[in-house]
Amino acid sequence: MFKITPNPPATDPIPHDPALSPQKIKEATDRALDYYLRPEALGAPPSS
């Protein structure tokens, strides 16, 4: 069977950035979720 589109080229994997530790990523995610979903937790006035 003939394949219409060619296979994608082989690429190197994205290098891991050691500055992004799993703990820092979790803390940043929690801050972002708290900012948007629980503004009272940060002391910000709730949006109307």
Image: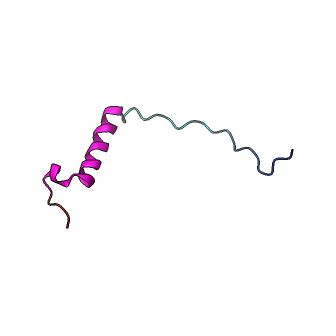
Magenta stretch containing residue 46, yes or no?
no
Q: Residue at x 77, y 50 (%)?
A: 5
Residue 21 occupies quadrant: top left
Residue extent of the magenta highlight:
21-44
Relative to residue 19, is residue 8 depicted above or below?
below
Q: Residue at x 42, y 35 (%)?
A: 17
Relative to residue 35, is residue 48 depicted above or below?
below
- Picture coordinates of residue 18 (x, y %)? 40, 32
- Picture coordinates of residue 7 (x, y %)? 73, 44
Secondary structure mainly formed by the magenta segment:
helix
Left or right: 41, with 20 as reference point? left
Quadrant showing the N terminus: top right
- Picture coordinates of residue 10 (x, y %)? 67, 38
Left or right: 48, with 2 as reference point? left
**From this viewpoint, which residue is outermost toward the right?**
1
Quadrant showing the C terminus: bottom left
Relative to residue 17, is residue 34 depicted above or below?
below
Left or right: 31, with 13 as reference point? left
